Amino acid sequence: MKLRLIFIGFSVLLIGSCTPSVSTSPQIIVPQLETKMEMVTRADWGWVPLTDTIPTHEIKYITIHHGGEDFPEDKDVIKYLIGLQSWSRSDKNWIDNPYHYMIDLQGNIYEARPIKYPGDTNTDYDVRGHALICVMGNYENQILSKIQFEQLALLTATLADKYGVANDLIKSHKDYTETLCPGKDLYRYLEDGSLIKRVVELRKP
């Protein structure tokens, strides 16, 4: 399937080094390359239009999740997205995929639920006002790659600029409720501040 990409936000030059941290967590060394935020549209991956709606909301927070299931390199992302949407509607009685944006193992970003509608969760935090980003995979077991980290930071920075979200309101699922999500390997970059540091670098002045 040939996918059409839409370009959002701004071009950035990624910095080839990072400052030392007091944390003992390993730090990502960002490669030198020029990138734009590209997104696979709902129409291009086969999203089925909504048949139901819920009250809309205004974005005040950005919250990071993981998929919570192991995601092998050869898994068909399009089939996964289509299946997730179908399961969300038929089994969970949600209006759509629970997340607004999803990032695959190669760092590709996909539109999911329209952002004007609150997402969904199997836990008890109130998702109204939250832009939900999900990194596909299980980061209790899997390792977040450099490109996933960079694309997550870029998407987060772009959304934060668009909706005026303060940096201290960029958090993860487990910051709001008892859960392993977004997994220990992804969460360490929120815990040691390196993800927010990168987001701040990428935000518009």
Image: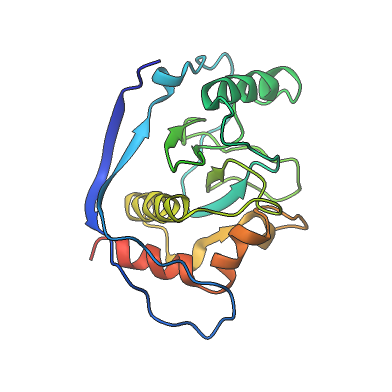
Q: Quadrant of the C terminus?
A: bottom left
The colour scheme of the drawn protein is rainbow
Side (left or right) of 43 relative to 173: left
Identified at 32% across, 67% down, the residue is 201
Identified at 36% across, 34% down, the residue is 39
Where does residue 180 sit, x and y in percent of width and height?
74, 55
Identified at 30% across, 67% down, the residue is 16
Between 163 and 201, the one nearer to me in the picture: 201
Side (left or right) of 17 relative to 189: left
Q: Quadrant of the N terminus?
A: top left
Identified at 67% across, 61% down, the residue is 184
Residue, far front: 74
Where does residue 149 sit, x and y in percent of width and height?
46, 55
The image quadrant of residue 120 is top right
Q: Is residue 135 above or below residue 202?
A: above
Q: Is residue 143 above or below residue 46?
A: below
Where does residue 182 sit, x and y in percent of width and height?
64, 53
Side (left or right) of 81 relative to 181: left
The image quadrant of residue 75 is top right
Where does residue 74 sit, x and y in percent of width and height?
57, 30
Tally the marks.
Answer: 0
